[in-house]
Structures are given as C-alpha cells and as structure tokens.
Amino acid sequence: MNWSELTAPYAFEFFRNGVYVATMAGALCGLVGCYVVLRNMSYIGHGLSHAIFGGYAVAGLIGVNLFLGAGIWGVVTALAIGGIVRRRPIGSDAAIGVVTTASFALGIALVERYGSPGRSADALLFGNILGVRSSDVWLVAGVSLAAVAFIVLAYRPLLFTTFDSEVAEATGVPTTLIDTALMIVLSATVLATMNVMGVTLIAATLVVPAVVARMLTDSFGKMLGVATVVGAVSGFIGMNVSYHLDLPSGSTIVLVGTAFFLVAFVASDTFRRRGASVTHAH
Amino acid sequence: MTSDVTTLISPVEALIAAERVTVAYENDPVIVDVDLTIEPGDMIGIVGPSGSGKSTLFRALLGSVPLHSGSVSRRAGLTVGLVPQVERIDWNFPVTVAECVAMARAGGWRTPWIRRGERREIDAVLERLGLDGLAGRHIRNLSGGQQQRVFLARAMFTGAEAIFLDEPTSGLDVTTRHEVLHLLDDLNRDGVTIVLSTHDLNGIATHLPTIVCLNRSVIGAGTPADVLTPDVLERTYGSPMEILEHGGMRVVVDSGHGSSLLPLRRDVGA
C-alpha cells in the first residue's frame, strides 16, 4: 500500500471528522481514565456509559435536549452511587452494578417501546464514527478543553484526593467538591465519546491507555502524559486501520489499544527483570 | 443525633480543644466524652490498645468525622499535617517521592509541575530528613523508615503548625524507630506541635513529655511519671501491668494475669 492509498480517505470530510474525533476522544479518555483506574473505579466507566444510555432515552421521551438530559442523568447516577455507598453497607461495585444496569435496562425498554430519540440505538451501543458530524468534533474538542482545564487547575488537590482521600480531607482539601467535579468531567467524557465509541467500548478506551501508561512509568505526571498519547495514537491508528481493513472503527481502536497493552506488558516485564538483575549484581 | 459542633474560634492559646467529644459509628460509640486540649509546642502521645479509638480521636480533632456530641474547637487558620499509618498507603500508586511531597501543597492555584523554587524547598525538606537524592524514586522502592519519613516530609512541606502521626513507628526496627523519634523531637524543638498515636509503650510513649491514655475515654493524661501507673495502665489495657525503673526511665512490663511473663513451654523430645 503506497502513500497515496493511505491518504486517500482524507479526501472525505466524514473521514477527517472521524479521525479528529477518534484522536481527541482517545486522548481525552486516556487522560481522564488515569483517575478512573487509580481510584479502582474501572467498572464505573463501563457502568456510567450504560447509565447515560438510559438518560439519553428518557431525555428523548420527555423532549429535552438529548446531550443535556443524558449528561445530567449521568452526573445524578454517579452521585447516587456515591450516596448509596455512604448510607448503606453496600460496596461500590455492587452499587454501580444496581444503579447503572437499571438505568441501561430502562433505556433499552424505552427505545424498544418508543423508538430511538436521535441516532439509532445500534450506533449508540456500538459507536458510529463514520457518521460523525462537525458538531461532534466541536463537542469532543470542548469537553477535552474543559477536562484539561479542570485537571490543570485542580491538579494537586485531585492527585491528593485520588492518592489518599482521608488525609487530604483532614488537611483541608475539599474532597467532596473535587470528587463531584471529577464525576461531572467523567460523565461529560463518556457522553461526548459515546457516539464515537459506543456504550459497549467506552470502558476500554478509558481503562486501556491508563493501564498501559501505569506499566511504563512510576510517576503520576508521566502517567497522565503517556496515557493521553497512547489514547490519541490508538484513536488515530484505529480509525485508519478500520477504513483500510473495512472493520468497525470502535472495536479497531480498542484492539490497537490492546496491542499497546501487550507491548507494554512484555516491555515492563523485561525492564523489571533487567532492573532486578542489576540490583542483584550490586 | 449528630451535633453541629465543630467550630473555628478566634485565636486562643489552644490549637485544638475537644470538649466531651463522643463519636459513634452506626450508633456504636467509639470514643465517649473525651476532653483534650492541644497547645502550641506540645508533643503528645495518645496510647491505648487496638480499637481504643486513637484513630477516631484523630479524625475528630481534625474534623473529618461527624461528632455524636461534644465540640471540637480549632484555632482559626490552623494548618495541620497528617501522617497516615503506612499500612493504609497504596504502595502501587504511581507517585515519586517529590510528587508525594508536593501534592500536600494543594491550596490555591499551583502549577501541576513542581517549579524550581518548590523543588529547592522539597530538596531541603528531604535533606533534613535524610532522604536527599531520592526525590525521583517511587515510594515503594524505599525502606520502611524512608517511607515513613516521606510522609513526614509531606506534612512538613505544608508548613503545618501541628503534625498528627498515626502509629508512626509501626513495623519499624528499633534503630529506625529511634531515628523517627529523634526527628519528631527536633521538629518539636523547632516549634511544631506533634501529636502521635502509638501502642508502643516502651519504645515510644515513655520517651514523650506528655501521654494520654485512651480506651474509649481518657483514662489518664500527663507526664509518663504521672500516667504510667499500674492502675491507669490496667484500666487502659484491661490487663495488669508492672512498672520498673531502668536508667531513670519507666519500663512497662505486661504481667498478664501473672502468666504471660513466663516463657511459652515446649516439651522437647516428649
């Protein structure tokens, strides 16, 4: 395959939009995913994407803006999970399981009964990156900018709260405010990328780049950078590969991320063995 | 019933004053009617058996747990640092020594990266604690004593007037324990108020100027000479204890119903 064949799809606006969105969405999910993984909340990304599907259906049914309605639904869901965990002796995994699957089930029931309010339910479930519009590009760009601004402005309290919430609170960090803001950013991230990746694949784009980065570095700052780059590169390569091999874009992006995971897994193991042998030699 | 009791008061002598504080989890009281005053320059050890409420008292004093009744007053503008038990730390969290120390300065707007001036401050704190050259190392790749000192450095980096340490010598060998104790003494001489919890009576508590014996409520408070008496210790630990004098210091010996002083017997070759 020569250069002109590789670049041929860039003649199409829909493809360019798809590449922009996939790259930005990958970077955004990689960045936010670090906090998800380090808070042992990997399942909440999966659950929240399902819950937001329910909010999308409800918003369509009652006739409010789909993005706004689904976003509010996602934030309320995330806060409800936290509230249940605090008030009842129920683990967060179980609370996420109950609340988000109930919301997803509600969404499925409403879509089946009244039809999909916007795009097809299949596109929401599995992503439809080739149907990306200019408005989607701007939406992902806006959410990405907001997420970066939040993480830059609240970097240290966010890190402190993620690492050691109890000590952070005891020494004056507004941990509840920080947690709530992170949930809003997470909900917006899931919502903005749902059309692109699909409900069923968002969890992977949140988790995989962060896990890859964690295996490659012991520094928090570097982890954020590596995860963002891995997510962006996965999105970019995945989009191109999906076009040329005629594969679904969402699953191709996830598979590219998984390839990074395998490489990092082997590389980090090699480095660890080498480090151990050097230490032993001393 | 949860009372609205935590208040900020105008500058007074005490940094923190707890009056008749009761904290309950699920209506099960953990500490009851605790009175405690912490004044500037104090170095206080809170001692008691496991489950006596030491950590809960810390949370109450720092305002991170709702009170069932009573009140805690903190001097307005008081800055505190908290060194957690090392067992509670997630050692797989990706954070270097420098990042761990820097995160404590979380108030106001700070750059995500460590600026040159801050780096110099961090290096100075690390050097003081004998951690120079370790700023870029992951916190897991340190010895137990170094790990403990990293979290002390984090508390110091905030410029805290009072530092609370939850079981700071847990899991440390004798030499490292003494190093940590001397570091705390140096800090205290520099004017930092130190409050620590420990169950180590001989290794830590007897060396401190002030001890508070806690078992759900305050059993006794004062100097080791005042507090380390058989009566107070038995009421605190629920077990008879004897006090010996050695080199001008008090040594607590568990007389454990008259049996635990004896070596455990093994019938060899029976």
Image (spheres, coloured by chain):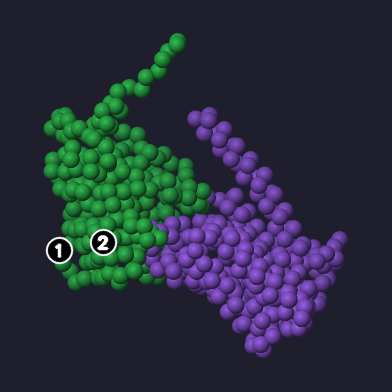
Chain colours: A purple, B green
- In the picture of the structure, the residue carrying the numbered disc 1 is B13
CA gap between label 1 and label 2 equals: 20 Å
Could you tell me which residue is drawn at 73 percent across and 58 percent down?
A: A256
Residue A62: x and y in percent read 66, 87
The subunit letter for the residue under badge 2 reads B
Is residue A257 visible to the viewer in this orientation of the structure? Answer: yes
Of the residues shown, which amino acid type is indicated by label 2?
Val
Query: Does B51 appear above or below A95?
Result: above
User: On the picture, is A205 further left or further right than A219?
Assistant: right
Residue A260: x and y in percent read 69, 54
The count of marks equals: 2
Can you tell which of label 1 and label 2 is closer to the viewer? 2
Of the residues shown, which amino acid type is indicated by label 1?
Glu
The subunit letter for the residue under badge 1 reads B
Furthest residue to the top?
B269
- In the figure, residue B261 lies in which quadrant? top left
Mark earlier in primary sequence (1, 2):
1
Residue A103: x and y in percent read 65, 72
Query: Does B183 appear above or below A229?
Result: above
Could you tell me which residue is drawn at 13 percent across and 32 percent down?
A: B248
- In the figure, residue A36 lies in which quadrant? bottom right
Secondary structure under tag 2 reads strand
Is residue B179 visible to the viewer in this orientation of the structure? Answer: no
Secondary structure under tag 1 reads loop
User: On the picture, is B194 further left or further right than B155?
Assistant: left
Label for residue B21?
2
User: On the picture, is B27 further left or further right than B8?
Assistant: right
10 Å crowding of disc 2: few (<14), some (14-19), many (20+): many
